[in-house]
Amino acid sequence: MKYTPQHAAPQDAPARQNIAPVVCYPNETLPSFDANFYDQVRDGAQLVESVLVPPRDAKTFVVPAGHLFRIVSVDGSQVGDLNLWHQNNLNERFYSGKTRALHGTHVSRSDRLWSSFPYLRPMATITKDTLDWYGWDEFGGSVHDVIGTRCDPYTHKLLSNDDYHYCCHSNLTRALAAAKRISLQEAESHVHDVLNVFMCTGFMPDTHQYFMKASPVRPGDFLEMFAEIDLLGCLSACPGGDCSSEHSSDGAACYPLLVEIYQPLDQRLEFWSSTKKNQYNQEHGV
């Protein structure tokens, strides 16, 4: 949020301000979304595992490459914070900033979730989104954002001077520590910026501050993804519930979220292979 300007606009201010913007990362050269392939993969896929994430808590899950997984609303309007890692390498993790740069502030069917440097490859491809009808509302809001960082106890302490232990950051930390049998301190170093599943967000038109509003998700809605590599996922059912009023509190109505993992028929993947690590040589000009 910027203060009232202290400097007079120069004579050429309109000319400077009216320069047309340019997209930073034109993505036409990225591999195209093969809708027919992903629809065929879904056809006949068998549910092989379900993980129920309790309210104000998080759970981990494993998705082998070539499998589908869904995050499903089950009992009420609820948002979730998703972390992803390579199953066998926690250093390769979801890179929300680069995903945002390549696809935009909010993601849906055909968009990919990209991994961190030096790997920078698709980790998962969004294949179905029952909230794709929402689009953009009159406030500039949309669903499934890669803007927000995750609610966390440090910011909560800063703003409220209160210790709250069930923020998504802490939920993800506890769940990863338990799954990998590592300390909370080590696990926390691997927790990263999230995909805010089902969350409806945008920027205020005057201050440009990040906002949230009641999620449009209802029981039965889901976001489906295809695992392009072997994945370890961790999902937190946010303590903000549908994020209509606040997060990081025990006041909001919260509900569980369900993760479903599907195994496609073998023949559907006959000519498919997992994505490869980015081919940059890492010489960095030396």
Image (spheres, grey):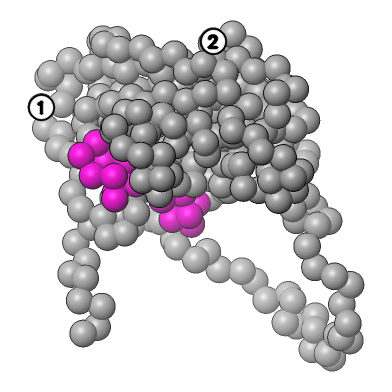
Which of marks 1 and 2 precedes in the sequence?
2
Q: On the image, numbered disc 2 is attached to which residue?
A: 74
Q: Is residue 229 above or below residue 91?
A: above
Q: Measure the alpha-carbon separation of dots 2 and 1.
A: 33 Å
Residue 110 sits above or below residue 280 on the image:
above
Q: Is residue 88 visible?
A: yes
Quarter of the image for residue 165 reads top right
Q: Residue 222 placed where, x, y %? A: 49, 19
Nearest-to-viewer mark from 2 and 1: 2
Element under label 2? loop
Q: Nearer the viewer, residue 86 or 68?
A: 86
Residue that appears at 71% across and 51% down: 158
Instruction: Say what amino acid the circle numbered 1 marks.
Output: Glu
Can the viewer see residue 73 in this picture?
Answer: no
Report the side of 27 relative to 196 (left or right): left
Q: Quadrant of residue 196?
A: top right
Q: Quadrant of residue 142?
A: top right
Tell me where the magenta segment starts and ends, as one range. 85-103
User: Alpha-carbon neighbours of circle 2 within 10 Å: few (<14), some, or many (≥20)?
Assistant: some
Quadrant (top left/top right/bottom left/bottom right) for the C terminus? bottom left
- Going by the image, does 51 lie left or right of 199? left
- Whole-percent x, y for residue 221 in the image: 54, 16
Q: Return the residue nearer the eye: 161 or 60.
A: 161
Q: Are marks 2 and 1 in contact (CB under 8 Å)?
A: no
Q: Position of residue 215 (x, y in %)?
A: 67, 26
Q: Amino acid at mark 2?
A: Val
What residue sits right under mark 1 in the picture?
270
Which residue sits at x=49%, y=46%?
A: 193
Task: Please say whether residue 95 is one of the residues in the magenta stretch.
Answer: yes
